[in-house]
Image: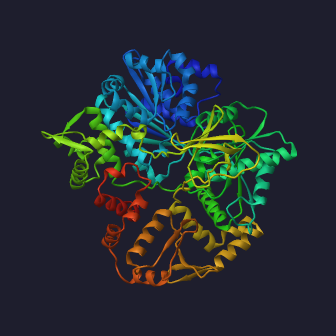
Amino acid sequence: MQAFDSLNRNIQEYIYDKGWPALTRIQSASIKQIANTDHNLILSAPTASGKTEAAFIPALNSVEEWKTGLKVLYISPLKALINDQFQRISELCHYLDVPITRWHGEASQAQKKKVVKQPKGILLITPESIEGMLVNRPGEAQHLFKGVEWIIIDELHSFLGTQRGIHLQSLMQRINQFMQNPRFIAMSATLSKTDFGYAKAFFGSKRETDILVDREKNDLFVTIDYTSGETGPFISRESLASIYQYSKNETMLIFPNSRNKVEEITHKLEKMAKEENAPIRYFAHHSSIDKVLREEVEFFAKNNEEDLFTITCTSTLELGIDIGSVDSVVQYNAPPSTSSLSQRLGRSGRRTHQSILHIVEDDPWEMLQTYSALDLLERKEIDAMETIETPYNALAHQVMAILFQKISVPLAQLMRMNQIFPVWKEISDTDLATLIDYMVEKEFIEIMDEEAIVGIEGERLLRFRDFYALFLTTSDFSVHYQHERIGSLPFTPDIQIESKILLAGRVWVVRDIDIKAKRILVDKTKEGKAPKFVSGEGFVSNEVRVNMEQLLKNETYLTLNNEKITEDFELLKSKLVYDEGNYWYEDEQANRGIVTFKGTRFNIALLLLIKSVAAEGETYQLHDKHSLITGPNIKKVMEELNKNEHSLDTVAAYLEKNEKAIEELTTHQKFMQLVPKSLKIKWILTNFFTMRT
């Protein structure tokens, strides 16, 4: 039986009226799999393969009675994606006479009240909104979710191996207590074979989980513009000129990895276009630009049919927000992983079925890393997910959330959370007891008659709006021009009255700073520089770094037929001395170091190990961009490490004496203030010295 023939007549009518020539491969396979089994399903397919319909159509088709409650819960990592999907499936819902409701901060309050009062149809929501509902309106949450038959998770890869993903797992297991064994469907554009087991276990469901993989991708056309010799903090003139030439003929996304570079490139391209009177629109898109301005950019790109435009962006546009058809992608500065590069490439070629990648680099290490990621991608080798083990901070947050939700919980029940919820099963009874004892000691929790309630310090946590999220948010100063909010900036020393800054691709002069209100008032001006955004560029994957070594060793780069790349890679190799299994490097200032060709996580672990055995007063540093660790006696220390077995007890003892090191390694893990020092050290040892295979 054909997949189409098994569908509800109203869904068939929708497909016919939309003029689809046929169901895509992933859609047909998904419809059959859902109809013939009672399993959960993960759909792994490239962007623009019809994953959304492959998830929603079989789920909606299987619902027999829509009048008895909410039936489908769709969970997205982004509000913008919720708005996208709302528009995308609203017409299908109209054919089925099924209501669909958005639930996030900007959604209609009237629609929210309506669905709570009379749960029905489909609800689109973020994890943080689920948490807010459970904490503040637990009765409504139980009433709303109890009839759910399907939970659809979008962009699964963005949750895997992250604090936010652990939070979502906990939330699903908490609301699952209200439900009758719902089925799950998840969508992912990039999923490595090595992550299949981890992905299947993500739902914490008793049902079996199947994975459908569609590996068909657009043809890939690659260009390389490489120059070097003009090193520095700014993009080289040659690289900028190459990007500008492409922007004169193609609609593009540029991914330069940092907000500083986004602002610099956008401003300089716009300036070049004005000098030539070229009719090209240039936009900046990153998390510090106001949401309204970002949405305006997305709307323009999606609805534009004639104008040339270029959007310079960070990972904010890696996920599946529909921005229409983009001709090409520019990669400037190396992507941290193959999966990241794959996500970015998936944004182009929807119209032509040919993805165009312009590699523009002016640094040999960046060029080698980009080349490595592309090489792996072309061999269909997606890097494995680096997971978070023993997430004590996430567990502590969920302990507080459950106490807020239930007012009080028997202490004995709290001590069994690792047995009640599968997401915490790897945390031992001893560690759980240590965590809760510390939270009691620090007055986050109070114990009364063997019942746990929220303590004085715990009450303060809920006063902050970001309690509901496990991802970090910054408390930057907001930037305003007249009555328009432009975005936000970290308040660094170079932000002064009369300072000139770049934000949202435009130049501003600072006219006033309100410290108390955390507000910067600006006017338009002509020249400025990108502000110093405080952010990292992400951990580089181990697979990409290992492949970098192989590409150099095998001289695969010769096939590129690029004299400048060959020359610079040969020079790079000449500066590395291979001795006793290690690569050594020494610069003009006699700084000696070891080049590991390993991922960021490995490098941090090795640096810790080096520091733990180094002599008092010796300074060792990680320069992760070059996979390089330097220090005064690096060779001697590495010889000592190779000769003698050093257990993790040595590193633990070093951390015990160095509070600053603990803080640096846990600073990006939210709610670590709820975790005792002993468990912070254990978290560091587990996450940096244990690699999942």
Q: Quadrant of residue 684?
A: bottom left
Q: Quadrant of residue 623?
A: bottom right
Position of 12 with respect to 410 (left or right) is right
Please provide percent x and percent y for residue 444.
Answer: 27, 45
Please provide percent x and percent y for residue 403.
Answer: 27, 37
Residue 613 drawn above or below residue 131: below
Total count of labels: 0
Please provide percent x and percent y for residue 318.
Answer: 59, 45
Extreme residue in the right direction: 276
Position of 622 with respect to 63 (left or right) is right
- Seen from the viewer's position, the closer of residues 584 and 456 is 456
Q: Quadrant of the C terminus?
A: bottom left
User: Residue placed at 25% from the left, 32% from the top?
Assistant: 406
Position of 315 with respect to 196 (left or right) is right
User: Residue placed at 75% from the left, 31% from the top?
Assistant: 305
Please indicate, yes or no, whether residue 679 appears anywhere in the rendered image. Answer: yes
Please indicate, yes or no, whether residue 693 appears anywhere in the rendered image. Answer: no
Residue 300 drawn above or below residue 575: above
Extreme residue in the left direction: 449
- Seen from the viewer's position, the closer of residues 342 and 459 is 459
- Seen from the viewer's position, the closer of residues 91 and 588 is 588
